[in-house]
Amino acid sequence: MFNYKLFSVILILSSTLISAEELFDPLKEFFKEFETLYADFTQTLLNEDGELLERTTGTLYLQQPNMFNWHYKEPYIQKIITNGEVLWIFDEDLEQLTIRNFESDVMEKTPAAIILGNSKLEKHFIHRGLGKIEGFDWLELTPRDLDAHYKNIRIGFDAKKLGMMIITDNLDQTIRIDFNDVNKNIKIPIGLFDLKIPANVDVIDERLIENY
């Protein structure tokens, strides 16, 4: 079953607010000449006491402006794919596919917008530089929307390379995503951002409900 909390992750950052102009901004540096990205990831979910609830692994493909393929491979198989117009959520083990319209105004408020380099980032997040901690340059982004599903997002960069994303939700659970084998601006087959409906799966097309 689709987990919105995990999707908000997909779609993965001093007590004084420091603007991007006042502090070296690794996020801004990372997105210079950014077109595509590939990475492996390991995602862990911890409860408020720091106990491990879940660990998943997979791959991530991004392409500007709003295309991504977030593929969970272990311990279950789930694909979250969009071509910028349609969003597919395919739970392969459950043989269930959900189809939605891609809503850019909703997406730009989520953690996915951060690693996509959304131009409206400052509109939706308070941006705070945390400096270098244990070899990583850290940023913290706090949603301006009081009804957001998470309290803050921290992103760590190893030089200009995306290294880690840590999200704290409103239940004080922590989602940590470690990125490995990160490659920018490689050629990605456009077919990865589309999904042909597999045979013998239950399809829930929420676009039909929206248009009813």
Image (cartoon, rainbow, N blue to C red):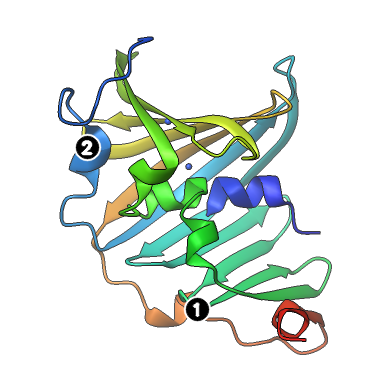
Would you place residue 41 above or below residue 101 in this image?
A: above
Tag 2: amino acid? Lys
Circles 1 and 2: CB distance less than 8 Å?
no
Residue at image point 34% right, 48% down:
182
Disc on the earlier residue, 1 or 2: 1
User: Is label 1 or label 2 in front?
Assistant: 1
- Residue at 23% across / 61% down in the picture? 185
Q: Give residue 98's quadrant in the image.
A: bottom right
Residue 30 or residue 152, whichever sits in front:
152
Q: Residue at x 68, y 45 (%)?
A: 5
Task: Locate residue 69 relative to residue 74 in the image: left or right.
Answer: left
Left or right: 89 with respect to 59?
A: right
Q: Secondary structure at mark 2?
A: loop
Check residue 205 in the rendering and tell me which mark sits there, or answer none.
none
Question: Is the residue 132 above or below the residue 34 in the image?
Answer: above
Residue indicated by mark 2: 160
Q: Nearer the viewer, residue 207 or 12?
A: 207
Instruction: Give percent across and percent down for residue 102.
Output: 55, 72
Q: Residues within 10 Å of mark 2 (few under 14, many from 20)?
A: some
Which three-letter amino acid code belongs to the residue tagged 1? Glu
Residue 87, quarter of the rendered image = bottom right
Task: Name the one closer to the observer, 205 or 75.
Answer: 205
- The N terminus lies in quadrant: bottom right
Which disc is residue 85 wearing?
1
Q: Quadrant of the C terminus?
A: bottom right
Number of on-image labels: 2
**Mark 1 surroundings within 10 Å by alpha-carbon count, few (fewer than 14), some (14 through 19), many (20 or more):** few
Q: Position of residue 160 (x, y in %)?
A: 22, 37
Q: Position of residue 40 (x, y in %)?
A: 46, 50
Residue 204 location in percent, x, y? 79, 78
- Tell me the SS state at disc 1: loop
